[in-house]
Image: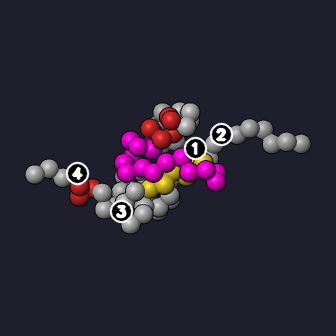
Amino acid sequence: MAHPTEHPHIVVHSPALDGSRRVTEGDETLGIATHVDDVGEILRLADLYVTDVEESDLIEWQGGGPDDWPGLSEHHEGP
């Protein structure tokens, strides 16, 4: 018996040295995010519409949650 089609399993991987995070579905890399908003855009471009990427059960956050972008937050500071 075949498995019914389930929701995609999206993984936002642990931050890289530059703070960016790879976004994958299964073995496929969907894109590289540098901010939580990027995750939503990457999923939209892949026709995976997730209304709240921070709270969605479809997304597994590895190495930190949606607020963890080490190395990148310093770049957003004002003068």
Q: Quick check: is 72 in the magenta stretch?
A: no
The residue wearing badge 1 is: 58
**CA gap, disc 2 to disc 4?**
34 Å
Number of the front mark, 4 or 1: 4
**In the visual, does 65 lie left or right of 72?**
right
Contact flag, marks 2 and 4 (Cβ < 8 Å): no
Give the residue at x 49% y 55%: 22
Q: Residue type at mark 4?
A: His
Q: Is residue 77 visible?
A: yes
Q: Position of residue 28 (x, y in %)?
A: 61, 50
**CA gap, disc 4 to disc 1?**
28 Å
Q: Residue type at mark 1?
A: Leu
Q: Position of residue 68 (x, y in %)?
A: 37, 56
- Which is more toward the observer, 22 or 60? 22
Q: Which residues are magenta?
A: 26-40
Q: Which mark is residue 7?
A: 2
Number of the front mark, 1 or 3: 3
Q: Position of residue 10 (x, y in %)?
A: 57, 47
Q: Residue type at mark 2?
A: His
